[in-house]
Amino acid sequence: MTRIAIFGAAGYGGIELLRILLAHPEVEITYLGGRTTAGQDVTDMYPHLLGSIKLPIEETSVEVACERADLLFFALPHGVGIPMVAEAVRAGKKVVDFSADFRLKDVTTYEAYYRPHDAPELLSQAAYGLPELHRDTIRDTTLCAVPGCYPTGAILALAPAVMAGLIEADTIIIDSKTGISGAGRSKLDLLYHFPEANESLLAYAVGTHRHTPEMDQELSLLAGSQITVTFTPHLIPITRGILSTCYATFAQGTTLDQAQNVYEEFYAEEPFVQVLPAGKLPRTKHVSGSNFCHIGLAEDVRTSRLVVVSAVDNLIKGLSGSACQCMNLMMGWDETTALDQPGMWP
Amino acid sequence: MTRIAIFGAAGYGGIELLRILLAHPEVEITYLGGRTTAGQDVTDMYPHLLGSIKLPIEETSVEVACERADLLFFALPHGVGIPMVAEAVRAGKKVVDFSADFRLKDVTTYEAYYRPHDAPELLSQAAYGLPELHRDTIRDTTLCAVPGCYPTGAILALAPAVMAGLIEADTIIIDSKTGISGAGRSKLDLLYHFPEANESLLAYAVGTHRHTPEMDQELSLLAGSQITVTFTPHLIPITRGILSTCYATFAQGTTLDQAQNVYEEFYAEEPFVQVLPAGKLPRTKHVSGSNFCHIGLAEDVRTSRLVVVSAVDNLIKGLSGSACQCMNLMMGWDETTALDQPGMWP
Amino acid sequence: MTRIAIFGAAGYGGIELLRILLAHPEVEITYLGGRTTAGQDVTDMYPHLLGSIKLPIEETSVEVACERADLLFFALPHGVGIPMVAEAVRAGKKVVDFSADFRLKDVTTYEAYYRPHDAPELLSQAAYGLPELHRDTIRDTTLCAVPGCYPTGAILALAPAVMAGLIEADTIIIDSKTGISGAGRSKLDLLYHFPEANESLLAYAVGTHRHTPEMDQELSLLAGSQITVTFTPHLIPITRGILSTCYATFAQGTTLDQAQNVYEEFYAEEPFVQVLPAGKLPRTKHVSGSNFCHIGLAEDVRTSRLVVVSAVDNLIKGLSGSACQCMNLMMGWDETTALDQPGMWP
Amino acid sequence: MTRIAIFGAAGYGGIELLRILLAHPEVEITYLGGRTTAGQDVTDMYPHLLGSIKLPIEETSVEVACERADLLFFALPHGVGIPMVAEAVRAGKKVVDFSADFRLKDVTTYEAYYRPHDAPELLSQAAYGLPELHRDTIRDTTLCAVPGCYPTGAILALAPAVMAGLIEADTIIIDSKTGISGAGRSKLDLLYHFPEANESLLAYAVGTHRHTPEMDQELSLLAGSQITVTFTPHLIPITRGILSTCYATFAQGTTLDQAQNVYEEFYAEEPFVQVLPAGKLPRTKHVSGSNFCHIGLAEDVRTSRLVVVSAVDNLIKGLSGSACQCMNLMMGWDETTALDQPGMWP
């Protein structure tokens, strides 16, 4: 059994990872670390785990975790985990990091969107944990950065079109809608207060959201030239799910049929990406509770625009499921282990 | 007192109009017509009206309604009401129609999106009931067509930019999100079945939605040249509200500050359109239950795109409130009568 | 115009009162006081009021409010407002208080459930603001205590049965379900954090909720003997509404038909209580957004129990609407002024 | 591998069973039968299963199913499946039935609440599929009737108290609140239409709900004397979950501490029932997506009443999870197979 440590175990990312790993036949959880929650049993905070696990949340200590575990997950806020990740890497441990700290290759971009980076030397050796694009790199890495929830859905929606040159690269607009679990658990705010969040729709961070440079980075890599997207996130009163509606002008002569074919081929062997049949569009509820990403294509004939819609569960394919998928690759296990269950309906 | 008849009184549009008119000091409701609901008292179907009104729903008869009323509202499905509207107009009555039947000036477009038109001769004399753009025409008309719920928010969001040439006209993309009351009451469907609609997001009718030609028509009129928009509607698990996120590339040299000024001036005298202060974006909950439209502006500096977000209550400013506003204009009353109340919070 | 001051204007109770009073023809709002929100315009916090009102929230000062207003509303947390209310009463002003501070006649009970009382001498002169039971007292009082949201629905549901001796008084169980706006705005908590509140049901404060002694007090008064109820509140993921399901064993020989008659007579003249036709039960949505209380009766024939279900909007009939209704009585105005509108559907 | 047939595969019960069985290592699904859905692939109707299974829904035929399967699940409406179940039993197959048809031992009671029974001779040999009370019987049966969703939570909440004589048996009142998935998928109704169900609470079928005699039967069996409960179900705008708040007067001299001990002992060895620590109450969200039942105890000291609150997921512990648990027992497998996963949070 591979021994696992989780830092930030009491947040939504950590707790969802814990749930997934409970069903994983190759791992054993040996350490849960929490910054503000140490001293409690995890079931005190999360009674849904009663009868499934009994484990204390401990003071945060990379040293202790390195003694007890072979692979460490860090589900900490941006910036906080950098020295801890660096310490674990130095100790020769495999690391999967949930934060944005090791996603961007360009430290300048990171620092423009986040804060000064304490371990820029690690950026080049970190893998961007989107298996559909970087499977081999992930297999070989010791440090894997799980993509942001928005970028996961948006990049998967656009990758085949960008790679195959189906669209004009400077026309990409991504309009995403997320459930409120994306805001996490530690930051209470009137925006997420049920009576005010319920029955409300809003856009935020237009043109400035921190997940934007990830999209640029990955799409540019695929295109072989710089791509700059417009990205607008929206907050929607559901708990889980991101729907991304992506717009771009068709490259001269491209048709929807062609695009459908390109997408089906591109994802033909992918265990967790489903390109829906022509004419069908995804719903977040169809992927809620699962590691799947559903993608549907449509066109606006009148304006020659391709419209690609993708759906993911922001806490699974958009976070903890991806993290497990990356771990499976890093450990040489079947990539789908503990992840091949569908969600519930309804 | 002006006597009022409502056809289709038992749908969401009719019942919301009825609620609004109950508070209107100049009118008296003398006739409620229903196609499938005749014979019931309106409170049998709508117990929320107990203690507020007691009125039977009657067999549909334009003749009877014309005897009893001075102004007739038709809240019927597309196509169904055309001969009835024509009959009422012939009888010299003022008519406000909720359907799409008299919104489009071009009968060919109507017939491409809907069905053969039984009274095309009325199209030219009908006013498009968006007071912010057609106030004088509405004042003078006897037949007013209430705009679609999506076009109301989208056109108000884009009108100043289009009129002032702030944006490149062929780059407009409108991504709208609607609450489920927009689907009406008479058509039960698994899409709207609570366990399946709840916690779900989806796009539909991409590039083909029937409300699209209204947007084209009105924006083209403002631009003085043909505009063809891309429009994608989404279904969101809330009851009321439409948020429209509108994208367009800035015309060379235009800035967000300029746009903010143009919008504030354009709507300075409008009683129901609020341009939010620079930096603020609207929420549907802020207009839920009211006739207001909130509009906020942002930009994606990286791609020189203007992003305008508008919020309306789809059943009020997007339907029955607009209908009342039009009636007020047609009757020469204060335009805000019965409409000047804010919504509830939370 | 009667001049009105509102303390605690920025909470849900204050802001809902403000909305109601905006439509009231006899009043003018001249002062809004806030403890932590002073200095802001009310529309900064509540953009739904844009275009309806523009008024600063001021430092809390009874002295200033007494200069500027004839009637003062206090929508403050329990205990906080006592000295302020006392000051206003001394100044000869009419006062309507939203807190529990003046609801209980017995200071010992108040202090057992709340805290030491700073002005117990006012308790005897305060009216319990439930017009259906205390209309004349309210008319004559200068200090009116608005009932708690739970007691309003529960007492109205049980009053006729208790008064007429239809039920065995020691068998009363009240199972109430409330929307989350009842938790207010100032206390953010994971319980109300959308991702955790959504899709969740729970009971709380079983047998110990602070609203229980109000129910005892009022029902005992009606019965002429001590009544002690069992009360369990539940938190439900809706914004507004309380449904109270009340159980009691029928007194020997009593029938449901009799009960139905007693209820219909008891509330025959009440403008805001609707006893539903035999066989019908209320829904919170039917009273949401209105000052109505709907009451429906049923029986469990097998166990000879009467089941009375009532529905109110917790922020209107359960709070700010009642407050306005009381003001109308205290001022000698038509009791229904500004309150006679139905809610919206859907 | 044991071969499994599911009739009524396209309803919520069938589809949830299918999901659970996909993770079951001992079974293979060889037949899906549907009455109105035959001819479609199950993923056409349920895209959340894309990538997890591909299986046609076939015409309903017990003969075919008996050829292909060893154990048959019937998830059909009451009455419809009786002859089919009888045929399968005659063919020597093991059967698990989701309907009410084989739950009640007394055919007169069944017929009073449902309809004439076509195979009353099977009633005595059917096991009531609540493992916590009938584990041995279930192990030995060939025909197992899965309990109703409401009875599951209510009986588990009351069983220890009734068995140990902690409460006065004629004082039991059960106030249950269910999510809307309990209404199923095939019956569309305005009650479940999102815009009308959302933000609404209601009670229904007071004193007459068909699940009531199940509660009486099982509690009477435990008590050794006739128990007649009062039961009121409520419809709540969530998808999954039932919270049951159960009231009863303490038997003379009984204390809450005693009750807590009795409950903890009663369920000490149960894999899926969690008695919460003293002072804690359950939330439906804590059991949503899992086969657990959470139970919490409280008292109303003032009236000497015990209040027991239980929470289950109506589609898992309240239906398809229980069905799997019963199958595990009938087949001699570990009772928790495919069921030992916690739900998701949030």
Image (spheres, coloured by chain):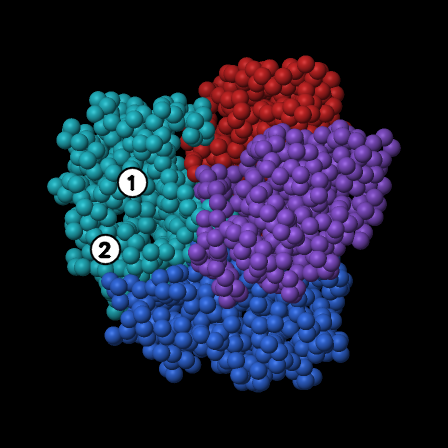
Chain colours: A cyan, B blue, C purple, D red
Image-quadrant location for residue D185: top right
Image-quadrant location for residue C304: top right
What residue do we see at 39% from left, 55% from top?
A: A234
The residue under label 2 is which amino acid type?
Asp
Residue C2: x and y in percent read: 64, 62
Residue identified by numbered label 2: A216
Decide which of D245, C94 is in the foreground and name it.
Answer: C94
Is the residue marked by circle 2 packed among few (<14), some (14-19), or many (20+) residues within 10 Å? some
Residue C146: x and y in percent read: 65, 46
Report the residue that reaches farthest toward the right. Answer: C253
In this picture, is C181 found above or below D139? below
Q: What element carries label 1?
A: loop
Dot 1 falls on which chain?
A: A
In this picture, is A329 found above or below C14? above
- Residue B48 as seen in the image, left or right of residue A45: right
What residue do we see at 68% from left, 22% from top?
A: D304
Q: Are marks 1 and 2 in contact (CB under 8 Å)?
A: no
Q: How far apart are marks 1 and 2 (CA)?
A: 22 Å
Image quadrant for the N terminus of chain B?
Answer: bottom right
Decide which of B88, A13 is in the foreground and name it.
Answer: A13
Residue identified by numbered label 1: A77
Total marks in image? 2
In this picture, is B326 found above or below C303? below
Decide which of D141, A343 is in the foreground and name it.
Answer: A343
